[in-house]
Image: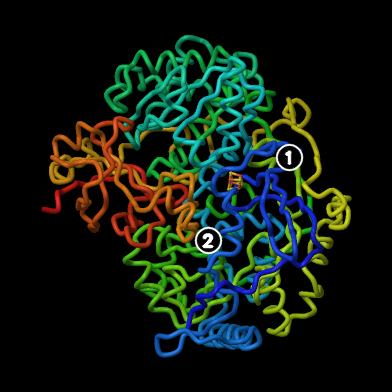
Amino acid sequence: MIQNSIPDIRACVPDGIYRTACELCPWGCGIEIHIKNGQMEKVRGNRDHPLNEGFLCPKGLALKDFIYSRERITYPMKKENGDWRRISWDEALDICAEKLEIIKVRYGPKSLAVAIGMPVLLGGNITVSFLRRFCDIYGTPNCFSVESICYRCRIIANILTLGKFPAADIAAAETILVWGNNPHESNPPAARNIDKAVKRGAKLIVIDPRKTASAKKADIHLQIRPGTDGALALGMLNIIINEGIYDKDFVSNWTIGFDELARSVAAYDPERVEKITWVPARGIKKAARLFAVNSPSCLVQGTNSLDQHINGLQNSRALAILFAITGNVDREGGMVTTSKLRVNPLRLPEKMEGQPLGVERFPLFYEVWGRAFGEGQAMALADTILTGNPYPVTGLIVSGSNPVLTWPNSYKLTKAIKALEFTAVMDMRMTATAQLCDLFLPAATFLERVELCDYYGTLHAVPFIALRQKIMKAGEAKSDMEFWLELGKRMGHSDLFPWNRVEEVLDYALSTTGVTVEKLKQQPGGITYGEKMIEYYKKKGFSTPSGKIELVSDTLKSLGHDPVPVYHESPESPVTNPAMAEEYPLILTTGARILEFLHSEYRDIPKLRKKCPKAFAEIHTSTARTLSVKDGEEVFLENEIGAMTITARVTEDILPGVVNVSHGWEDSNINLLTNDISIDPVTGYPLLKSLLCRIRKKA
Ligand code: SF4
């Protein structure tokens, strides 16, 4: 039984206007929720918010449709003989507690895995730490998140290089380098900032195989062959070093390994790089000179476009080195960090048993110099479930994630989930992953829970925090924190979960900061917290073992990896595998974002779906001509792993020979054509951006 009428959703605050932070995508735009007659009347942008100044993207504008969607499920359900049966929360919590006890007794606590997705991560660091506290107390180290394939790779690369992870200070930049990023589709606040900067005279360089909206406005657009970004970055470093246009004082005082870097990048002269990347040497030179000379310069890197490669970590290392040696670290208009909230830790890692899956092979994915990220590498999960090696994993709780559509190798993952003894999903609606599970737990949206939006500094270099207030109530839906708190108590750990309400947990965590939930409620919309840390290294150095920027990494060397960034060709390319390329002559790049959606979310909202009704494979006009394929024609898209039917979108705006397909479509799941075998050797990130494929006419 699945709910198909409008669920019981109403305001839980008096009529009025309430400020909060949008969470329909990561960026956290300021919004105002208008409540009238006990219902949400409309949403408006918050003009006073430092990020979006009142602007909302189509997703934000469709918030009311999202909250009141007929697809929402607002009560727990249990699967019985293949059908869903509505149950109470009491029964759902009892089932979870009982199954988790059985798993622990039969196989040990490590046999439970927890996988969290974007809506949980966007609940802020306190929410995530609280969930991990449950895992610690239960004893499982096997907590995984979407960061196994997205974003963490470049954080690790930046920490290994700079000891920190800075963000682009677009507003004050003279040159903006947008690399593998399409902000008009994936990051509208950044797109607005870039457009404003260009209007005031900043220069724009875009590196992308597609002619994106930003590329069309750019001073320089380098249309790169997918998968070769590392070679291009090394080519730019080659020019900058050869021409002596790096920041010599900064390099000599604040970096180590410059000579070794210079020797290494000498092999990447522009002519050689042109052959690898298909980018003309003169364009590479122009871009390198502009970035180095017309500073301050910042880098707006795609969320995972450079990470999902076999060179994932080295790509991001090369980019970090690019902005470091040109003197753009801790610089207004360059790359900056902001001071962080130092909250009371919620985790109890001493209670967990052993280390998570994937850590033995990818130790830096778990921690760098004792700075633990606290997660396993999820790409190890399916094989472990299917083989029982190194130990059995028999239970899985998925929260706000739809890995069947968003993780690579959907065939294998589906088989693995089906093989588990107990599976529960916490989500707002039925998903491809939830359909495979035993228990459905209804999740609250961000308007129906209390949490701290504390990541503006990390994402935007804006020192700001905001409280998301509980404005609405949806049937029996619970927030993640409420669920884990209640489950912890039900499993006999009230002493370790001594709180009754989420606000109490937040206040406990914030008790070291001078901020309280009550204070934040008095300033709805958010407060400035801390500052941009300009020239911070002059006070404290860099948080690396040497105290300097590590152009050469002894840490990587000690683990058998390249200590300076080098480029390795994708195992699926005309260069490395000409036989495969003969059969599958097109380069497939997957996972590009579409403005109306976020990964597998929001396709159930008619207003958004109307703008992009179905999945498409974007190909260049000349490629289409060779294949005799017309725009809008249904075609077969195939590779060595799988095949699917998809609509061809024929355009001038993509490099000839490249096929671009986005992910998250239930009826055209591109992850049926991806695998988890070709991976970045440092982080375990899968190769999703440069595969080989072919397109065949259906008739
Ligand atoms: Fe919300 Fe759109 Fe802003 Fe993302 S960009 S936070 S979806 S309004």
Depth check, front residue: 301 or 670: 670
Task: Give the x, y percent position of residue 30.
Answer: 70, 45
**Residue at horizontal 64%, vertical 74%?**
8
Q: Which residue is mark 1?
A: 49
Identify the residue at the far front of this view.
37
* Whole-number angstrom distance, CA of label 2 to CA of label 1: 36 Å
The answer to whether residue 671 is above or below residue 419 is above
Tell me where residue 651 sits by quadrant: top left
Amino acid type at mark 2? Gly
Tell me where residue 40 sits by quadrant: bottom right
Task: Give the x, y percent position of residue 638.
Answer: 21, 52
* First reached walking from the N terminus: tag 2 or tag 1: 1
Q: Mark 1 vs ligand 1: CB under 8 Å?
A: no
Q: Residues within 10 Å of mark 1 (few under 14, many from 20)?
A: many
Side (left or right) of 675 relative to 471:
left
Amino acid type at mark 1? His
Side (left or right) of 220 relative to 326:
left
The total of numbered circles placed on residues is 2
The answer to whether residue 541 is above or below residue 153 is above
Task: Give the x, y percent position of residue 666.
Answer: 37, 62
Q: Any mark on residue 200, and which?
A: none
Q: Which residue is mark 2?
A: 376
